[in-house]
Amino acid sequence: MKAIIIEDEKPAARRLNRLLDDLNVEVSTLLHSVEESIDWFQNNPHPDLIFLDIQLSDGLSFEIFDVITIKSAIIFTTAFDEYALQAFKLNSIDYLLKPIDDEELEKAVKQYRDLMPEKERISVDFDDIKKLLVNPLEREYKKRFTAKVGQHLKIINADEVECFYSENKGTYAATLEGRNYLLDTTLENLEEELSPKLFFRVSRKFYVNINHIKDIVSYTNSRLQIKMNTFKEQEIIVSRERVKDFKLWLE
């Protein structure tokens, strides 16, 4: 998926770029005005997805569509809600109000991926098909991980990991001994490597091990908070859209 960001506030554009990087969305270009955007669209292949602010430094971004025919999908990112109706007349997937909530952004990106043309969605190779045919409870999952500690390699047993989490573009394993080890992988890669009997992805940032959950308590907005035996560095919150699946997983 190729994406661009059109946003006149550069700090907001950089933050959005970081959030999208965590969602494996490749942002190729940052644009900051109507004029700059029109020039770019006239001279470059159009992306799959545009993250578009509405009020730019030199006018409303709707003016771009008066000059350029754009077939890209659009997710609007704006501080104003009065343009929602006008936005949805265009090729829009969602309308996100600033400050952008990372979970709302993740839902919007997922919505786009679900709506992608079928030819893009079904481009799986033979290995992918074989994975789908294997019973997930019969598969062999990764039992050990390695982390570099100084000049040494630390062997980490999967059943000793309380949780895996992402932070500052790094992926960490938090162990029973209270240590956090940086791994050379991503949470997305771990999805294929972790046993679903032991681990569940409760949010964009966390996988938890069912054997090391100390307590589960109610949290705001119908979410849940998980407390692990030793991990205390961050709150672990089950995102709202994953609460139902999480409860089923616990059973």
Image (cartoon, rainbow, N blue to C red):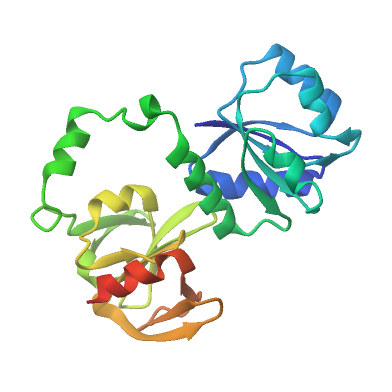
Which residue is at the far right?
A: 58
Residue 93 vs residue 140: left or right?
A: right
Which residue is at the far top?
A: 43
Which residue is at a point 12% across and 42% down the rendered structure image?
133
> Quick check: 25 above or below 210?
above
Residue placed most toward the observer, 75 or 166: 75
Whole-percent x, y for residue 50 in the image: 64, 34
Residue 1 vs residue 40: left or right?
A: left
Residue placed most toward the observer, 118 or 37: 118
Residue 174 visible in the displayed image: no
Whole-percent x, y for residue 213 in the image: 32, 81
Whole-percent x, y for residue 120 in the image: 39, 27
Which residue is at a point 74% across and 19% down the rendered structure image?
40
Whole-percent x, y for residue 81 in the image: 78, 54
> Quick check: 114 above or below 223?
above
Residue 147 visible in the displayed image: yes
Residue 51 vs residue 124: left or right?
A: right
